[in-house]
């Protein structure tokens, strides 16, 4: 690969952003009720200039109350998971790392189940419980994995796996205690599901959290390039390894926690999108981070559109789609050689 | 502000002192260290007080068998750990008090081969050496690229810049890693067992190059090794370590005493003085025959 | 407020990208340099693309929900889970999200108002012909919206809370039922009748159902309840807990489930059942023939063959209407009652409705020839 220049970075990101735009348009167009593209553009224009009331009612409901929020959520979740996956792969120096390897999703699942058992009537309880569970797991694994204030990769990995297994066991026990109705919701959540609309407040929280998280990780992207050659080597080249590892760990875990609390545990995206981007664009993290974010968003938007339209009128959960598409992609990448 | 400028400045400052003799660059003064599992328990390994000094253009060899404390001394010099007693100073500043960035601008460390997770181009790899001088995302500016290219040229690896690290031979990889260290424009270069995976020809080539670079660019070079022959041939000073104690410091001829070396390396040896005043070491089998 | 936030976001982003962009530009840009202008263009394009996405986000945040303005003044009802529901005066189009609710709508005579139901709504036959919106657990929200219903019916035991919340979010009124007993099922019929504006037919239907049930109570008044195991599933063995309407149906039919747990669908151990030795095993099925074969296969299995009920053939198969809290359930209860207490039915009983006939091995059904 040619060395990275600012120009190449911007061109690549610009191109990917255009692709993302195309996917968004496709997602808004397809569905149980077909919408034409020209109408869409005109209506977006009408909304922008404030004349929203002129649109036909159920059409507006479908596109702007149902599809657009869902697509936006998909973008946020896809970007968050891909960046988190790429970051963990650098932090743990392990190509098999994904956002859930440190136990965040199991903690979030446990949190949401406990929240459902305690206060089932409160509408926001599932994302709140999930987020709190995720935060508790992040803190727990940090304390398990740190030695003298330094995050050690192997210990961190082990701590995460132990937490994940432990929580999964508790979840299995609890699901036998739960009544049928709540169980169904949890099963969908565990598979990853974007069909639950999220309130506007939560969307903003998520967006801000995403920008802050990705921004923090991106600021260390040059350090991450060096960290991959080894921690000792990176220290001797001037990287403040302790600070970088802490920033990346907290930010990536936060991104995972946000994604998981609104959409459940959508699998494969965090693992495969960074590898696919590496195959095409190289492993320079200054390009990998924004490219993964954009490609992850595209992947989730397309997967969600497929999940909505492949077996009408039933909706499949997004996680099922990414798993079905993810496995063959994973096999292909393995044969190419994970690079 | 690039490194050559800082050189000129500090060199100017030092002119006031000793013009005719080169100033001491690396000063290890009674430095010691102890590893222990916890605060209360007995130390598992101790490095006793060690002192030596190194000047510009000098090659110092830290010599000793395995587990003699070489790595600990190395880490004291790089400032990764702080000495329990004594001081380690580079140009008057204690190494462990420096911040990571400044340290990287002054000291370059060449480690043994570490597994590369994601391969990169050799050219990019060498560019990583410019990290301590950049800011933010560190997109390479023309000056950095020039310095990196120079560094590769100095190790004779210009033709390697477009190749991936993974496909290089051991010797070529060593050269690229050295080039990265040179790109840091350091004052002190530390090498940790650099000859482990190299064949004899490559070993000699590496050390000759180091001597040449030290002369031209006024580096101080410290090599940690257990190779008796190489240290004798190329080092200006030798620091002999044994079980965490510094037994002797001095030019090779002074350190290479037969009884001392036999005790340290636990092998029957013969030492003779070669031409140019450098000692040569021969192994002797237990039965008394010569194995050279 | 949001505009201020957006403006600051734009400014910050613009400033950042400008700074980053010019970090690697030579200090004296030559404005005639093509390289320079291509660079500027790249920055510009990238920024526009991202700004568009932020604009979309702003559009979503700034929109107001439609249905609050579009809904004509109606009535406010409280549904069976305590939610307040705004229902229009005239309910013309209804979407049902559960099979039992579809049955109730048809039983109330409002079948023509049903605009859509689920894939699993199979009774009556017209229900299967209606437009489908997907399964009860994951219906397609867009389909529901495109049918333009005035009211959506859901039930707590089958539909997900998230679906109800989503429909709320869009502004469609949802009435949620939650019957735990046969009496509550009849009450649901009345509630739905009032929601749909079919109070009269609801009252008639409720009276009929209650009448039949009290008739049943009278007949069964003397006898002791039979100890019953209701088998939902065989591998693993799942029965019903005491809070379910199935358990209540068993009670009304003169039986008592040997399984008394709080959990709704408990996994019970076969050993425990062998220890309890229920008098009768009850299976529910839509296809009597298949079930008969399955039961025959069970006879030889360990554990099952130790059950006296299995050995003596005290097995009753009722129609799966007993699983759905709808009027047909009462038919199934009557059949079950006959099978459990044949001695109470020596007098001619009221005619049964047109559901699957119950099969039993040695307990003969009092096939009332006069009734048909």
Image (spheres, coloured by chain):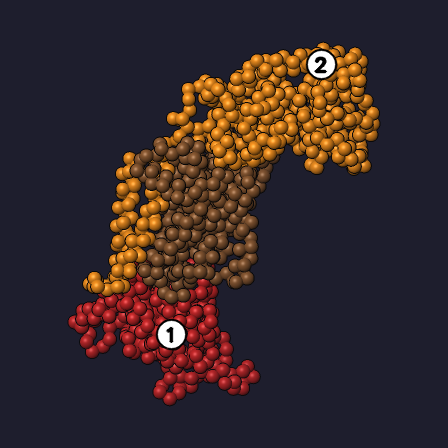
Q: Position of residue C242 (x, y in %)?
A: 64, 23
Q: Which residue is mark 2?
A: C216
Q: How many numbered circles are shown? A: 2
- Asked where in the image residue C335 lies, by quadrant, the reply is top right
Q: Secondary structure at mark 1?
A: strand
> Residue A233 placed where, x, y %?
39, 63
Question: Which residue extends farthest left?
Answer: B16
Identify the residue at image location x=46%, y=80%.
B200
Chain letter matching colour red: B
Query: Which residue is nearer to you in this view: C106 or B207?
Result: C106
| Residue at left offset 35%, top offset 62% | A4
Tell whether C343 sits left or right of A162. right
Residue corresponding to mark 1: B61
Question: In this picture, is A52 found above or below C53?
Answer: above
Q: Is residue B196 above or below residue A240?
A: below
The chain assigned the colour orange in the figure is: C
Residue C114 visible in the displayed image: yes
Q: Dot 1, how many residues are within 10 Å of its Cα: few (below 14), some (14-19), or many (20+)?
A: many
Q: Nearer the viewer, residue A206 or B81?
A: A206
Q: Left or right: where does residue C202 sit relative to residue B205?
A: right
| Of B24 and C137, the residue lying toward us | C137
Rendered shade, chain A: brown
Q: Assign the N terminus of chain C to one quadrant of the image.
A: top left
For the residues carrying marks 2 and 1, which lies nearer the camera in this image?
Answer: 2
Quick one: A50 or A206, which is closer to the camera?
Answer: A50
């Amino acid at each position: 690969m040619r060395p990275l220049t600012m120009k190449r970075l911007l061109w690549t990101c610009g191109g990917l952003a255009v692709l993302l735009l195309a996917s968004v348009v496709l997602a808004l167009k397809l569905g149980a009720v077909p919408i034409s593209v020209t109408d869409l553009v005109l209506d977006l224009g009408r909304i922008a200039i404030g004349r929203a009331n002129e649109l036909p009612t159920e059409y507006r409901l479908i596109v702007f109350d149902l599809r657009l929020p869902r697509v936006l959520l998909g973008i946020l979740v896809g970007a968050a998971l891909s960046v988190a996956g790429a970051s963990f792969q650098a932090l743990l120096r392990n190509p098999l790392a994904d956002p859930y390897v440190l136990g965040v999703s199991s903690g979030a699942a446990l949190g949401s189940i406990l929240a459902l058992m305690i206060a089932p009537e409160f509408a926001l309880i599932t994302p709140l419980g999930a987020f709190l569970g995720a935060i508790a797991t992040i803190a727990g694994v940090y304390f398990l994995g740190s030695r003298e204030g330094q995050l050690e990769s192997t210990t961190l990995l082990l701590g995460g796996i132990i937490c994940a297994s432990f929580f999964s066991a508790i979840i299995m026990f609890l699901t036998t205690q739960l009544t049928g109705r709540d169980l169904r919701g949890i099963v969908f959540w565990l598979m990853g599901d974007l069909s639950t609309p999220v309130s506007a407040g939560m969307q903003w929280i998520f967006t801000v959290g995403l920008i802050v998280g990705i921004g923090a990780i991106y600021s260390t992207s040059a350090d991450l390039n060096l960290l991959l050659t080894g921690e000792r080597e990176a220290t001797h080249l001037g990287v403040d390894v302790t600070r970088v590892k802490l920033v990346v760990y907290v930010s990536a875990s936060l991104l995972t926690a946000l994604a998981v609390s609104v959409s459940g545990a959508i699998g494969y995206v965090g693992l495969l999108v960074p590898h696919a981007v590496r195959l095409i664009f190289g492993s320079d993290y200054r390009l990998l981070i924004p490219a993964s974010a954009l490609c992850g968003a595209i992947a989730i938007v397309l997967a969600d559109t497929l999940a909505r339209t492949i077996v009408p009128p039933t909706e499949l959960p997004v996680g099922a789609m990414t798993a079905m598409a993810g496995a063959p992609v994973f096999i292909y990448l393995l044969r190419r050689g994970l690079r | 502000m690039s490194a050559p400028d800082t050189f000129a400045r500090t060199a100017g400052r030092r002119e006031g002192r000793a013009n005719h003799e080169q100033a001491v660059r690396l000063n290890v003064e009674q430095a010691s260290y102890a590893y222990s599992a916890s605060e209360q328990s007995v130390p598992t390994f101790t490095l006793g007080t060690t002192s030596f000094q190194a000047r510009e253009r000098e090659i110092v060899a830290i010599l000793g068998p395995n587990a003699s404390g070489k790595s600990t001394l190395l880490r004291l010099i790089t400032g990764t750990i702080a000495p329990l007693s004594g001081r380690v100073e580079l140009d008057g500043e204690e190494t462990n008090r420096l911040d990571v960035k400044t340290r990287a601008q002054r000291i370059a460390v060449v480690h043994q081969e570490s597994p590369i997770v994601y391969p990169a181009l050799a050219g990019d790899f060498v560019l990583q050496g410019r990290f301590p001088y950049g800011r933010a995302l560190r997109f390479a500016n023309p000056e950095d690229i020039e310095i990196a290219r120079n560094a590769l040229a100095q190790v004779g690896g210009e033709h390697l810049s477009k190749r991936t690290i993974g496909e290089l031979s051991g010797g070529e990889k060593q050269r690229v890693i050295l080039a990265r260290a040179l790109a840091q424009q350091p004052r002190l270069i530390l090498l940790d067992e650099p000859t482990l995976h190299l064949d004899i020809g490559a070993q000699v080539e590496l050390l000759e190059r180091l001597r040449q670079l030290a002369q031209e660019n006024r580096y101080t070079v410290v090599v940690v090794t257990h190779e008796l022959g190489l240290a004798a041939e190329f080092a200006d000073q030798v620091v002999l370590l044994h079980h965490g104690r510094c037994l002797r410091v001095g030019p090779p001829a002074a350190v290479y005493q037969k009884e001392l070396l036999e005790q340290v390396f636990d092998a029957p040896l013969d030492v003779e003085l070669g031409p140019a005043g450098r000692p040569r070491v021969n192994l002797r089998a237990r039965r008394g025959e010569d194995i050279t | 407020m949001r505009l201020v936030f957006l403006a600051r976001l734009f400014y910050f982003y613009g400033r950042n990208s400008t700074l980053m962009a010019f970090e690697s530009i030579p200090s004296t840009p030559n404005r005639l340099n093509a390289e320079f202008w291509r660079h500027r263009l790249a920055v510009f394009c990238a920024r526009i693309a991202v700004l568009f996405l932020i604009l979309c986000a702003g559009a979503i945040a700034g929109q107001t929900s439609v249905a609050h303005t579009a809904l004509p003044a109606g009535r406010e009802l409280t549904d069976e889970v305590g939610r307040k529901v705004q229902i229009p005066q005239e309910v013309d189009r209804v979407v049902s999200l559960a099979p039992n609710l579809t049955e109730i709508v048809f039983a109330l005579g409002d079948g023509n108002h049903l605009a859509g139901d689920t894939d699993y709504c199979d009774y009556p036959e017209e229900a299967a012909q209606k437009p489908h919106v997907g399964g009860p657990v994951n219906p397609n929200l867009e389909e529901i919206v495109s049918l333009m219903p005035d009211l959506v019916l859901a039930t707590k035991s089958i539909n997900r809370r998230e679906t109800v919340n989503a429909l709320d979010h869009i502004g469609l009124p949802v009435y949620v039922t939650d019957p735990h007993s046969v009496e509550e099922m009849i009450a649901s019929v009345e509630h739905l009748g009032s929601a749909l504006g079919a109070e009269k037919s609801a009252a008639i239907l409720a009276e009929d159902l209650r009448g039949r049930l009290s008739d049943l109570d009278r007949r069964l008044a003397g006898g002791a309840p039979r100890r019953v195991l209701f088998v939902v599933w065989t591998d693993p063995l799942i029965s019903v807990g005491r809070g379910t309407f199935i358990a209540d149906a068993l009670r009304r039919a003169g039986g008592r489930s040997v399984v008394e747990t709080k959990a709704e669908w408990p996994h019970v151990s076969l050993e425990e059942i062998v220890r309890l030795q229920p008098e009768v095993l009850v299976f529910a099925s839509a296809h009597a023939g298949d079930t008969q074969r399955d039961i025959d296969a069970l006879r030889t299995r360990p554990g099952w063959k130790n059950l006296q009920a299995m050995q003596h053939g005290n097995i009753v198969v009722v129609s799966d209407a007993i699983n759905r809290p709808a009027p047909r359930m009462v038919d199934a209860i009557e059949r079950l009652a006959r099978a459990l207490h044949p001695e109470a039915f020596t007098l001619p009983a009221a005619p049964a409705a047109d559901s699957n006939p119950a099969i039993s091995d040695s307990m003969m059904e009092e096939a009332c020839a006069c009734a048909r």
